[in-house]
Image (cartoon, rainbow, N blue to C red):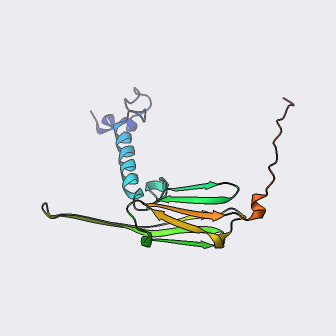
Amino acid sequence: MSMRDLIPWGRQESRAPAPYRDEDRNPFVSFRREMDRLFDDVFRDFGAPGLFGRGAGWPHIEVSSNEQEVRVSAELPGMREQDVELTIDDGTLCIRGEKTSETEDRERGYSERSFGRFERRIVLPDGVREEEANARFENGLLTVTLPRSPEAQNRRRIPINADTRH
């Protein structure tokens, strides 16, 4: 038996189909997918974009809007307000900071230090009064409230008519 017969993707098409052609059953593909997910989860906590361009940014951001205000919330567990910097420049809200973590177990002779910088930019909608922005940091949740100008509050909603030609 040659080495080529042991490798499913190295066989010729004229022979019987390889037992692991299906990606869901291939142990190597499954193992690689799990390792990628593991590394994405580890690096996501410190602001890295994830492997191969996948993964959401950190911190997790939620933007909500109504007629009176725009509200941006960022989850920053384990951080203090002095570790976070907020700026508004040219219609963009920037949240940046640095997360540090230190663990030490003297009994076992174990210590671990990790750190990572993060920066998230949120483009603000038109009609926001940037100079009246208000920020609150409580229990690891940063909430930025930006009131809307009266002109932005008086927008007229345009109804959408269904096309009945079908």
The residue depicted at 69 percent of the width and 58 percent of the height is: 68
Question: Percent position (x, y) of residue 62?
Answer: 55, 55
Q: Nearer the viewer, residue 124 or 68?
A: 68
**Residue that sits furthest to the left in the current view:** 107
**Residue that sits furthest to the top in the current view:** 16
Question: Percent position (x, y) of residue 80?
Answer: 40, 68
Residue 102 drawn above or below residue 53:
below
The residue depicted at 58 percent of the width and 68 percent of the height is: 134
The residue depicted at 42 percent of the width and 60 percent of the height is: 139
Tell me which corner region of the image, top left, top right, bottom left or bottom right, holds residue 150.
bottom right
* Quadrant of the snapshot with the N terminus: top left
With 123 as the anchor, is 138 left or right in this view? left
Q: Nearer the viewer, residue 1 or 33?
A: 33
Q: Nearer the viewer, residue 30 or 101?
A: 101
Tell me which corner region of the image, top left, top right, bottom left or bottom right, holds residue 102.
bottom left
The residue depicted at 37 percent of the width and 29 percent of the height is: 19
Q: How many marks?
A: 0
Tell me which corner region of the image, top left, top right, bottom left or bottom right, holds residue 24.
top left
Question: Percent position (x, y) of residue 6?
Answer: 30, 35
Question: Percent position (x, y) of residue 50?
Answer: 44, 56
With 146 as the anchor, is 38 left or right in this view? left
**Residue that sits furthest to the right in the current view:** 165
With 143 as the anchor, is 6 left or right in this view? left
* Quadrant of the snapshot with the C terminus: top right
Q: Nearer the viewer, residue 29 or 35?
A: 35
